[in-house]
Amino acid sequence: MRQQNMSLEVIGFLGFLILPSGLKFLWSPLIDRYRIGNLGHYRGWIICFQLLLIAIIFFSAFIDIQNNLIGLLICMFLACLFSASQDIATDALAVNLLEPQERGLGNAIQAGGNFFGAIIGGGGALILLEKVGWRYSLIAMSVFMLLNLIPTLLYREQAIANSKVNKSYFQTFVRFFSRPKMLPWLFVVLLYMAGESMTTTMIRPLLVDRGLSLSDIGWLLGVVSYSARIVLALVAGVMITRLGRRRSLILFGLIAAFTALLYIVPAMGIASLPVLYAVCILVSGTQSMAYTALLSAMMDKSDRATAATDYTIQVSVMFLGGIAATILSGILAQQTGYTITFIISTVVSLLSVFFITKFIVD
C-alpha cells in the first residue's frame, strides 16, 4: 500500500482489520462449551477454522487487487476472523497441555512457532510476491497451510474436564473479572505490547520510504528478524523459569522498550543494509523476549476448565491495545514523523513496566 503512495494514516487504520482478535473473547465461551463431532474438544475447532482460513486465502489469490481493494480488504478481514477464532482453541489446548513449570519454555516454543510462521508468511511470501506475483504467492501459501493440518489430524486430544464451565454465558466473564487484581493486570496487558505494535506497523512503510524493495523487506523483517525472534524467545523461555514471571516481565520489558529507540536510525535517513539488519535483529529479538514473558504470565492467570475464555480475554485486551496503537502510530507518523512516533512507543512500553512494579506480584 505504501508502494501505491497511500498515506501513513490509511495504513494505520488497517489496524481495524485485526479487530476480530480484539473481540474474539465474545465467542470464546462457546468454544469452551461446545465441540464439533468426535474430533476432540479444541482439536475440532482448530481443524474447522484452519480449513476456512485456507479457503479464504485461496480465494484471495484470484482477486484483482489493483481494481478491487474493497474485495481484498473483506477477504483480509475474514482471514483475521478465522485466524483469531482458531487462536481461541489453540491457546486453550496449550493451557491444558502445559504444567506451570513448563510454561516459560512452552510459550517460548509456541512463540517460536508463531515467528517461524511469520518467516514463511511475512518474509517468504513477500519474496515470492516479487518473483511470481500475487496469485501464485497466495496459492502457495494456501497449499502450505493445508500441509500444516497434518500434525493436527495426527494428534489425539485427551478429554478435558469442563465441570467449571458456567451454564450462563455472562457468568464466565464475571468469574474471570472477579479475581484479585485482574483489572490492573489487564491494563498492563493493554499497554505492554502497544509500543511494539506502533513500531512494527511503522517500520515497514519507513523502509519503503528509504527505497528498500519488497524482497529486501521480506528478508530483513521477515526471514532474518523473525529468526532472531525464535532464538531469543527460546533464551527467554529458559530465563523465565529462573527469574520468575514478574522479574522477567520487568527486565525484558525495559530492554525491549529502550532497544526500540534504535528504529530512530533509519528514521534519520540511514539506509545502509548492514546497519538496518543490526537494528532490526536487536529490536525484534528483544521484543520477542518480552512477548514470551507476557504469554507465560497470561497462561498462569487462566483456569484450565475455562482456558479458551480466560486466556482469550487477555489476548483480546492485548490486541485492542495493539489496534489502538496501530491507528495512533499512523496518525502520529503522518503528523509528526517517524522519530517522534518511535519515542512515544518507548514511553508507552515503559509505562506498562511501571505498572508491573506497582501492581503485579508473581
Image: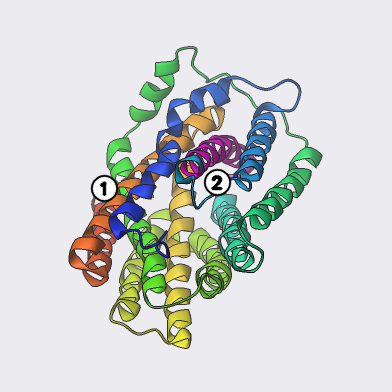
Q: Which residue is found at the position 33% from the left and 59% from the top? A: 198
Query: Reading the chain from its start, which is encountered first: label 2 or label 1?
Result: 2
- Figure quadrant of the N terminus: bottom left
Residue projecting furthest to the right: 154
Regarding residue 360, the answer to whether it shows in the image is: no
Q: Quadrant of residue 170?
A: top left
- Amino acid type assigned to the residue bearing label 1 in the image: Phe
Mark 2 and mark 1: span between their CA atoms? 21 Å
Q: Position of residue 74 (x, y in %)?
A: 48, 38
User: What type of secondary structure mainly makes up the magenta span?
Assistant: helix
Q: Residue at x 49, y 60 (%)?
A: 240
The image shows residue 12, relative to residue 183, as above or below, that is: below
Label 2: which residue? 100
Q: What residue range appears in magenta?
A: 72-100
> For the view shown, which residue lies furthest in the front direction?
67
In the drawing, does residue 38 fall left or right of residue 125? right
Label ID, residue 32: none
Q: Nearer the viewer, residue 4 or 324?
A: 4
Residue 124 x/y as whole percent = 62, 65
* Disc 2 packing (10 Å; few <14; some 14–19; many ≥20): some
Count of residue discs: 2
Residue 135 appears in view: yes
Residue 327 percent coordinates (x, y): 30, 50
Q: Is residue 156 above or below residue 280?
A: above
- Residue 90 in magenta? yes
Looking at the image, residue 214 sits to the left or right of residue 135; the answer is: left
Identify the disc placed on residue 359.
1
**Amino acid type assigned to the residue bearing label 2 in the image:** Pro
Indicate whether 58 appears above or below 161: below
Dot 1: few (<14), some (14–19), or many (≥20) neighbours within 10 Å?
A: few
Provide the secondary structure element on which disc 2 rests: helix
